[in-house]
Amino acid sequence: MSDKNFDVIVIGGGPGGYVAAIRAAQLKMKVAVVEANHLGGICLNWGCIPTKALLRCSEVYHLAHNAESFGLKVKGLEFDLQKIVERSRGVAKQLSGGIGHLLKKNKVTVFDGFGKLEGKGVVSVNGKDKLTGKHIIIATGARARILPGLEPDGKFVWTYKEALVPDTMPKKLLVIGSGAIGIEFASFFKTLGAEVTVVEMMDRIVPVEDAEISAMLEKALTKQGMKIIKNAKVSKLDKGKDEVTAHIEGKDGKVEKLKFDRVISAVGIVANTEDLGLEKTKVKLDRGHIVTDGYLKTDEPGGMRLAMSRVLHGWRIKRRMRGSFAPRRSSAKKTYTRWISLTFRAVLIVIRRWLVSV
Ligand SMILES: Cc1cc2nc3c(=O)[nH]c(=O)nc-3n(C[C@H](O)[C@H](O)[C@H](O)COP(=O)(O)OP(=O)(O)OC[C@H]3O[C@@H](n4cnc5c(N)ncnc54)[C@H](O)[C@@H]3O)c2cc1C
């Protein structure tokens, strides 16, 4: 096999991609990963890991504030936002670097660049290097959803990327969307002293969690002083010199205008499926997401093409390629149960913090 021919080519080096790649290599396949940005994907670089590093700092800050209830005395407690951010970036960098070592150790070849399908079993890297593979795994992940009128500008309006590396501590922060990501940032900045308002379209926060979790979390966050506006949407943001006026529209159509100095838009994610060359294949898309069967296999015949996200998917796909994995109806459910329990951990951090203070 030449150095450009592989058993498996994985496009995307996030948790979905690198786990699948390592498992395939362990099963004696010749594997390549094509990654356009940083190994570890969003999770290690701009998601799960750096947010948890920030949350850990705010948790320690909160504990120190409540030191007396533990019989401890802490005087002159302050925080340095830039050092908190540096620590979070350092943790992300260290873990991302670790993925490079893991891939090398497992003899997976990494190509830096944008991967694109160029016909059956062919993937180009930055339009140049042409790799061939018997199997191709698409693990290109997702990015922040941008709603019209709420476009991030990197200054007043942030996505999770800017919120992870804030240049300033917001005084009055608006978080649009109360999913796990929105609530994590709301909790972080609230604990460090920002006045935080969360606007959620649904009738409860963290709407994908169980209703009991939503109710308990809302109680905990409200007790901390967070303002939560449900059944409402932010329809417009008017930007001034130093502040943003948000038009918050209730279900009855009434609009309340509130001023903030920073806004985080956390209204969901969209799949990275553009410019992948999918139009040359039989892969079907549903609202930008790749349609797969119970084996995470697409409609492209012959060389198996699979779309997936996250660790368990990657692992399942490799077993399927070896023919040792039969999907059960409960398999997908299991994956999502694991995912939910991960977001639930973030929820628990907030609840635990509340319990500590009572
Ligand atoms: C702020 C935040 C906090 C989160 N917290 C948690 C959490 O606590 N727990 C949890 O389980 N999940 C969390 N998530 C979600 C988690 O990050 C994702 O579920 C996970 O990263 C998905 O992994 P993936 O491999 O499918 O995609 P990604 O991690 O998005 O990786 C995809 C990779 O593909 C690369 N890529 C894209 N297109 C191409 C191309 N054409 N060629 C080459 N490379 C390409 C990208 O550069 C990227 O590195 C969080 C997300 C965010 C944004």
Image (cartoon, rainbow, N blue to C red):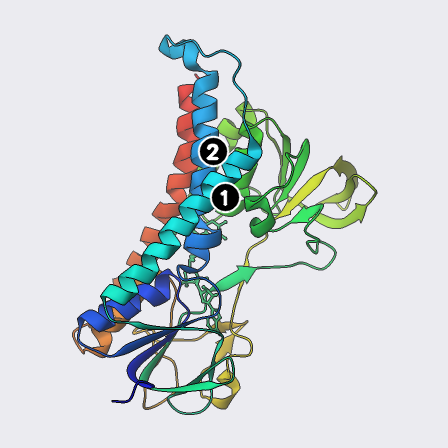
Instruction: Decide if ligand 1 comes within 8 Å of the CB at mark 2.
Output: no
Q: Among all residues in the image, which is located at the extreme right?
A: 241
Q: Quadrant of residue 3?
A: bottom left
- Which residue does the numbered mark 1 point to in the structure image? 206
Q: Quadrant of residue 122?
A: bottom left
- Residue ID at (43%, 75%): 291
Q: Quadrant of residue 346?
A: top left
- Looking at this view, is 329 or 222 the one in front? 222
Residue 67 in view (yes/no):
yes
Q: Residues within 10 Å of mark 1 (few under 14, many from 20)?
A: many
Query: Is 325 situated above or below 245?
Result: below
Q: Residues within 10 Å of mark 2 (few under 14, many from 20)?
A: many
- Looking at this view, is 127 or 195 the one in front? 127
- Looking at this view, is 37 or 319 the one in front? 37
Instruction: Find residue 156 and report its horizontal and vertical position in percent.
Output: 71, 45
Q: Earlier in the sequence, mark 2 or mark 1?
A: 1
The quarter of the image that holds ligand 1 is bottom left
Label 1 is placed on what type of residue? Val
Label 2 is placed on what type of residue? Leu
Q: Are marks 2 and 1 in contact (CB under 8 Å)?
A: yes
SS for callout 1: loop
- Residue ID at (52%, 40%): 85
Badge number at residue 217: 2
Instruction: Find residue 257 and report its horizontal and vertical position in percent.
Output: 79, 39
SS for callout 2: helix
- Residue ID at (68%, 31%): 171
Residue 327 in view (yes/no):
no
- Residue ID at (29%, 74%): 295
Tell me the quadrant of the picture where the N terminus can be found: bottom left
Instruction: Find residue 237 and report its horizontal and vertical position in percent.
Output: 77, 48
Query: Is 194 situated above or below 211?
Result: above
Q: CA distance from mark 2 to mark 1?
A: 9 Å
